[in-house]
Image (cartoon, rainbow, N blue to C red):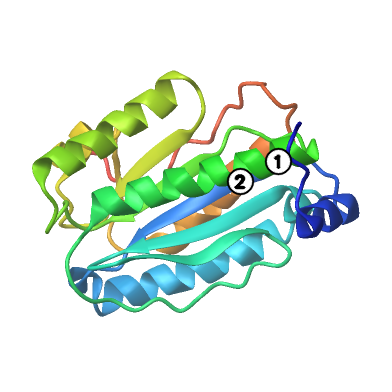
Amino acid sequence: MAEAPRLEDAVEFAENPEPRCPCVLLLDTSGSMQGAPIEALNRGLRTFKDDLMRDPVAPKRVEVAIVTFDNDVTVVQDFITADRFEAPILECQGMTHMAAGINTALDLIQARKERYNLSGVPYYRPWVFMITDGRPQGEMPDFVDLAAQRIQEEEATKRVVFFGVGVEGADIPILSEIVVRTPMRLRGLNFNELFVWLSRSMLAVSDSKIGDAVALQPPGWAAVD
């Protein structure tokens, strides 16, 4: 016997039956992000919200979740539509438990897709957008390797789109070993432009037909090595 959707899901999806475009922001909040970087990141999150709200369709289709990783991994915001999303104020501490963050983000997506499927809600391929200024710290190499392998499997089966963005100081060669797509390097602390690009990309996806390929604008915020 098929599992029935949860009551809160039934209500949520009945009130808003639009197809969903889920995106996890996987954000490094380790100690090295202290000061100007985390302040710029917090401003960028507000820009992301504001830009999504300018579109007539995206606020009901784009779903945002936020996972942070430092000494701990925290689901700061579970999936919520853009019209209900409020940008948090993030703080920094500790080391960079990146692999644990990756696993949490992918687990969150899997759980959300199961809820879509139970409720008969169509959805676009989920995105994970990881922003970090470092490399994995405090984690066993085998654990990091398994997280990288999981990204490879999710990308290969087209279950997720996983982007890696390195802030100044990030170990881009190590990121290249973890993510499938070529990591992008943020120019300076240009988080506002990054989040406007991300917002416009999500708008383009949410305005397309499910399964269609969507051409994204070049990331003008990315540094060219």
Residue at 14% in and 47% down: 171
Residue ID at (17%, 52%): 136
Q: CA distance from mark 2 to mark 1?
A: 6 Å
Q: Residue furthest right?
A: 15
The answer to whether 103 appears left or right of 20 in the picture is left
Q: Nearer the viewer, residue 142 or 21?
A: 142
Quarter containing the C terminus: top left
**Residue 204 in sight:** no
What residue would you read off at disc 2? 112
Which disc, if any, is residue 116?
1
Residue 16 percent across, percent down from the top left: 85, 52
Q: Residue at x 18, y 56 (%)?
A: 134
Q: Is residue 107 visible?
A: yes
Name the spot of residue 204 as percent of width and height, x first. Answer: 66, 38
Circles 2 and 1: CB atoms closer than 8 Å: yes
Placement of the N terminus among the 4 image quadrants = top right
Task: Please tell me whether mark 1 sits on a helix, a strand or a loop.
Answer: helix
Amino acid type at image mark 2: Arg
